[in-house]
Image (cartoon, rainbow, N blue to C red):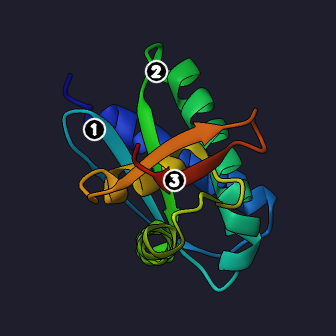
Amino acid sequence: MTISITTVNSCREIVEELLAKMDIASEITLRANEEFLYVDIATEHSGLLIGHHGDTLMSLQTVVGLMLSRRVGERIHVVVDVEHYRERREEALTNMAKRAAEEVMLSQKPITLEPMQPFERRIVHLVLQGYPGIMTESEGVEPDRRVMIKPAV
């Protein structure tokens, strides 16, 4: 599926309207590929839009995606980012996962990480997928779902 210019423009309007209602000055950049419409927001108020571990950002992404899908009449996968938060968070999660894996390998005892968003848990699972002697599994129920890193049996 190719995302049309009309859809991109509709998305821009939705994001601009939401941010205006929140009284947040920003610069919005949109780009699309075959599957996703990416919305990058630059603002001095990034903390307000990101929230604790990206909770507000995920909510904003959900709202934008729902509003856009309703407006254009088809499901559009929207990814919203603020000040490259997702990139920074991925790097932090990668480092945390590797440190935890090393600790599990040394102690041979499982470690359970903090609750995470689904996209964050996926990053941890992918980073540790090739680690010898390590297994990962998600446990718990949203919003307290966590990744457990444990020695492979």
Are the two marked residues, 2 and 1, in contact with CB atoms closer than 8 angstroms? no
Q: Which residue is drawn at 66% across and 61% down?
A: 54
Q: In the rendered image, is residue 51 in sight?
A: no
**Does label 2 or label 3 sit earlier along the sequence?**
2
Give the residue type that dot 2 points to: Val
Q: Position of residue 86 (x, y in %)?
A: 47, 66
Whole-Å distance between the Cαs marked 2 and 3?
Answer: 45 Å
Residue nearest the observer in this picture, 26 or 56: 56
Q: Which residue is drawn at 58% across and 40% down?
A: 138
Mark 3 is surrounded, within 10 Å at the Cα level, by few (under 14), some (14 to 19) or many (20 or more) other residues, namely many
Query: Element under label 3?
Result: strand
**Does label 2 or label 1 sit earlier along the sequence?**
1
Give the residue type that dot 3 points to: Lys
Please name the residue that numbered disc 2 is placed on.
Answer: 72
Give the residue type that dot 1 points to: Ile
Mark 1 is surrounded, within 10 Å at the Cα level, by few (under 14), some (14 to 19) or many (20 or more) other residues, namely few
Residue nearest the observer in this picture, 90 or 63: 90
Whole-Å distance between the Cαs marked 3 and 1?
Answer: 47 Å
Please name the residue that numbered disc 3 is placed on.
Answer: 150
Left or right of residue 109, residue 49 in this image? right
Q: Split into 4 quadrants, where in the image is the N terminus?
A: top left
Q: Split into 4 quadrants, where in the image is the C terminus?
A: top left
**Does label 3 or label 1 sit earlier along the sequence?**
1
Q: Residue at x 59, y 62 (%)?
A: 109
Are the two marked residues, 2 and 3, in contact with CB atoms closer than 8 angstroms? no
Q: Judge depth for marks 2 and 3 and give the one in front.
A: 3
Residue reaching furthest bottom?
44
Left or right of residue 21, residue 71 in this image? left
Quadrant in the picture for residue 64: top right
Q: Where is residue 122 in the image (x, y as percent from the top left)?
A: 44, 47
